[in-house]
Image: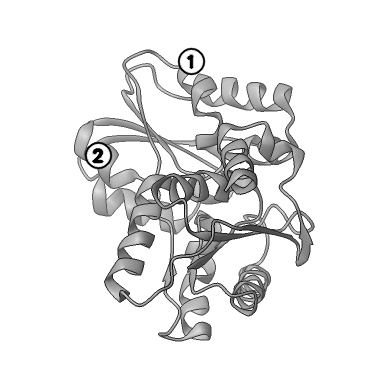
Amino acid sequence: MMIGLIDSGLGLLPTAAHLRELRPELDLILLMDPDGAPWGPKPDAWVIDRVVNAADRAVSSGAEVIVLPCNTASVTALAHVRRHLGDAIPVIGTVPAIKPAAAASDRIAIWATAATTASAYQARLIEEFATGRSVTSVACHGLADSIDRGDTEAISAAIRAAVGATPEDVDAVVLGCTHYPLVSNEIASLLPENVRLFDSAEAVARQTLRRIDSAGDFASGSSELTVFLSGRAGELPASALAHREGRLLSELSIHQ
């Protein structure tokens, strides 16, 4: 079984790592786009074209399932990818973990990119799942880009700025960009101890496995890891290996 995961950068690593931990035998194709990142500020038509082309590349390389562990890709291109690939290829999107955070807390901050923070999509999720809660949207300027670059000083500066914009009485923070779980330990270390972090990576991984299991006719796989960088065959970038998730994917692929 081969699964293709599509993101502009390292945001696909947390979901991919959960998939590898839960089902080590799966073959994974990671499709990143360093030439086009970040996707958030780009026009919708540009993002749709980029994501659909990545999905085609994944399928032509053998992917039987497509995952979009990226909020921008999911909001902008999910329906287009599903329509383009048809019913034979399951396509799983990502939704920020606002619903579980609202079930656990009345005082929530949502950390996300500037584009997502300003989006009607996030506003609809807040209205649907967090009505009656105190919700603060925090735009984490430059954090995702800094993670992709592996710029530790810029990562720390962006996290400190986001902490400073987060009300002191908040006890739940939604990591509304799929890059942010990669630095969750540093985020947690700068927030009060009672603050709980919520992200969607494990939920997306488990939903992917449910779709696979419900179909019941997929071959198992051989634990291979394939990487494409803006359409070119490549390897996990050095910035990926700075994170536990990147090292896990690399090490398990080598030793299987």
Q: Nearer the viewer, mark 2 or mark 1?
A: 1
Q: Quadrant of residue 249?
A: top right
Q: At x 36% / y 13%, what residue is drawn?
A: 193
Residue wearing tag 2: 102
Residue wearing tag 1: 189
In x, y percent, where is residue 75? 48, 63
Colour treatment of the image: one colour
When the figure is inspected, residue 45 is found, relative to residue 161, above or below; the finding is: below
Q: Residues within 10 Å of mark 2 (few under 14, many from 20)?
A: many
Q: Residues within 10 Å of mark 1 (few under 14, many from 20)?
A: few
With 48 as the anchor, is 36 left or right in this view? right
SS category of the residue bearing label 1: helix
With 94 as the anchor, is 13 left or right in this view? right
> In this rendering, does residue 139 appear at all?
no
Q: Amino acid at mark 1?
A: Ser
In x, y percent, where is residue 240? 67, 40
Q: At x 44% / y 24%, what residue is drawn?
A: 166
Q: Amino acid at mark 2?
A: Ala
Give 113 or 85, whichever is nearer the viewer: 85
SS category of the residue bearing label 2: helix
